[in-house]
Amino acid sequence: MPESHLPGGPTQDEIMAVSLFKLGLCPADTVLEIGCGTGRVSVAMAKQAKMLYAVDRRPEAIATATLTARKAGVSNIGYSCTDASEFLKSGRIYDCAFLGGTKNIAEILPVLVKNVRRTIVINAVMVSTLECAVASLKELGVFTEVVQVQVSRSHDIGGSIMFRPIDPVFIIVARGAACS
């Protein structure tokens, strides 16, 4: 399935760069990704970490992400087609987590905070998701910051260039006690 057919589409390169920087992955890290979508972020994280667990509740997303990883020659990703709440019941511990999907975020964050040693990064496009995530992370005592990233790309027009904006993304960062 082509990337463009998945709601949300692929994460823009510039957004991914800032998100990965904020995540601060290390080669020995075990990482969880909730809402893997097209798999572009999965591949980028897997290249920097020891193991990545990618979760998405949509079978078409898992199929697309698996194909993306195969084409990139990345094999250290375990995929699960399930709801994040179900997946998190295993109690597995991760070094870092990235959330590209935000369904049930208020229920997921308390579990993630217990199961993630170092950093959680959430990409949000909706203000309601931003508000919910920040409030939850503050209540849990791990909120660090929000960075709003607005990217515009150049396009030719009348012998010159103009810039077309891409929707802004809020990058929400939480750090656990291990990072303090």
Image (cartoon, rainbow, N blue to C red):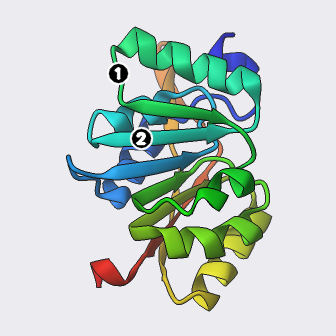
* Residue at (29, 33) in percent of width and height: 47
**Can you see residue 102?**
no
- 140 and 122: which is toward the camera: 140
Residue type marked 2: Leu
Q: The C terminus appears in which quarter of the rendering?
A: bottom left
Q: Tell me residue 145's x, y (percent).
A: 47, 76
* Residue at (68, 67) in percent of width and height: 130
Residue type marked 1: Val
Q: Tell me residue 20's x, y (percent).
A: 37, 49
Residue at the farthest front position: 90
Q: Relative to 173, does residue 157 appear above or below in the rendering?
A: above
Residue at the farthest left position: 27
- Residue 176 falls in image quadrant: bottom left
Give the left or right position of residue 152, taking residue 95 as reference.
right
Give me the C-alpha separation between circle 1 and circle 2: 10 Å
* Residue at (75, 69) in percent of width and height: 107
Label 1 secondary element: loop
Q: Which residue is mark 2?
A: 52
Q: Relative to 103, does residue 163 appear above or below in the rendering?
A: above
Q: Which residue is mark 1?
A: 74
- Residue 82 falls in image quadrant: top right
Q: Relative to 27, does residue 175 appear above or below in the rendering?
A: below
